Amino acid sequence: MRRALALFFPTFSIDRMRRRNLASGVRGPLLLVTTERGARKVAAGSPEACARGVEPRMSVAHARAHVGGGGEGGG
């Protein structure tokens, strides 16, 4: 008998990034950004960012306006 299991983790990439950045003290809304046809777009946002109106495929400029500016995190 074959069995299949499908799992959906909508915030997996954000959770992974958050765990990686805990040591560096990064707090607050997080965004994963991709370049799509030369434009920087939001690939995923943390629940905090989504609560502030950020959505996937939104431009980074619009997302920054929603979450309050800030520089580029990570490193």
Image (cartoon, rainbow, N blue to C red):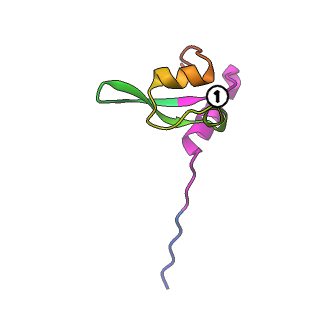
**Residue 42 placement (x, y as % from top left):** 47, 32
Region of the chain picked out in magenta, as a range: 7-31
Does 65 appear in magenta? no
Q: Residue drawn at (59%, 33%), measured in percent from left and top?
A: 53
- Quarter of the image for residue 13 reads top right
Does 23 appear in magenta? yes
Q: Nearer the viewer, residue 69 or 33?
A: 69
Q: Is residue 64 above or below residue 30?
A: above
Q: Residue drawn at (44%, 27%), measured in percent from left and top?
A: 59
Q: Residue drawn at (67%, 20%), measured in percent from left and top?
A: 24
**Residue 12 placement (x, y as % from top left):** 58, 45
Q: Is residue 32 above or below residue 12?
A: above
The answer to whether residue 74 of the structure is visible from this angle is: no
Disc 1 crowd rating (10 Å Cα; few below 14, some 14-19, many 20+) is: some
Question: Please, which residue is most extreme toward the bottom here?
Answer: 1
Q: Nearer the viewer, residue 40 or 27?
A: 40
Classify residue 15 as left or right of residue 32: right
Number of marks in the image?
Answer: 1
- Amino acid of disc 1: Pro
**Residue 51 placement (x, y as % from top left):** 65, 36
Residue beneath label 1, please? 29
